[in-house]
Image (cartoon, rainbow, N blue to C red):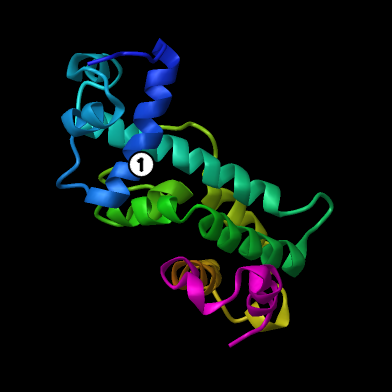
């Protein structure tokens, strides 16, 4: 079996090809041995980077969570606050998963009591959590939501209710657009997402 990867490149390949394999085969059928065969490297080479399937799952979760966190943080333009910041965050949330459907599928695949999407957001109390020390995407989400608490439409809601209501909307939209990509033409996705996020239902 030819091992053509440099040390750092193999770790990267294990994470990114592992993500694709998880989407294709699911968590139960996923293994380091199968992934090694997919990459054309020895089983031992893969184990030098990740001693177990669980360790690789954690690494994939860490990397995809960090991608998600950065996308959410960058979705809010500088000097934007209040309801506009929350709306921009929602648009960024939906577009991240539309552009990376395999990450949303992975977050839904990973075994976790409360869901890997919650782990990626940075919520606590999970069986499988990202080990990243960076603030989670949920911190960005919470900050944007808290800035809207005095707006008329939110005045009677608790913080958790604002978060839950808005999260339900943007996550539901992202899920529908990734599982039914034919529903909206690709060239209309941007304007459609913006209108739906901004429209109360």
Q: Is residue 126 visible?
A: no
Task: Spot the residue most to the front.
Answer: 2
Find residue 146 and report its image quarter: bottom right
Image spot of residue 51 (x, y percent): 21, 21
How crowded is the residue under tag 1: few (<14 C-alpha within 10 Å), some, or many (20+)? many
Classified by dominant secondary structure, the portion drawn in magenta counts as helix
Find residue 8 and report its image quarter: top left
Asked if residue 198 lies in the magenta stretch, the reply is: yes
Height in image: 154 above or below 31?
A: below
Task: Spot the residue most to the bottom.
Answer: 201
Image spot of residue 132 (x, y percent): 45, 32
The N terminus lies in quadrant: top left
- Side of 52 relative to 92 (left or right): left
Asked if residue 83 lies in the magenta stretch, the reply is: no
> Which residue is nearer to you in this view: 4 or 159?
4
Q: Which contiguous range is marked in magenta?
A: 177-201
> Which residue is nearer to you in this view: 164 or 53?
53
For label 1, the residue is 19
- Side of 127 relative to 63 (left or right): left
> Which residue is nearer to you in this view: 2 or 171?
2
**Label 1: element kind:** helix
Image spot of residue 100 (x, y percent): 50, 52
Say how many tags the image has.
1
Look at 66% across and 59% down and name the residue there: 144
- Side of 141 relative to 116 (left or right): right
The C terminus lies in quadrant: bottom right
């Amino acid at each position: 079996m030819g091992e053509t990867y440099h040390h750092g490149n193999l770790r990267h390949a294990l994470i990114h090809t592992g993500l694709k394999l998880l989407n294709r085969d699911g968590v139960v059928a996923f293994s380091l041995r199968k992934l090694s065969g997919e990459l054309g490297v020895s089983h031992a080479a893969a184990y030098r980077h990740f001693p177990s399937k669980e360790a690789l799952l954690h690494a994939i979760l860490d990397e995809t969570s960090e991608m998600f966190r950065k996308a959410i943080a960058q979705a809010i333009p500088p000097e934007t606050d209040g309801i506009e910041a929350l709306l921009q965050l929602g648009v960024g949330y939906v577009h991240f998963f539309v552009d990376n459907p395999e990450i949303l599928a992975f977050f839904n695949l990973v075994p976790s009591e409360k869901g890997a999407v919650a782990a990626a957001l940075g919520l606590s109390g999970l069986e499988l959590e990202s080990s990243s020390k960076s603030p989670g995407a949920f911190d960005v989400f919470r900050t944007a939501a808290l800035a809207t608490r005095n707006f008329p439409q939110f005045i009677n809601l608790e913080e958790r209710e604002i978060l839950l209501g808005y999260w339900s909307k943007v996550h539901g939209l992202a899920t529908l657009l990734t599982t039914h990509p034919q529903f909206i033409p690709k060239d209309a996705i941007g304007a459609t997402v913006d209108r739906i996020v901004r429209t109360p239902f």
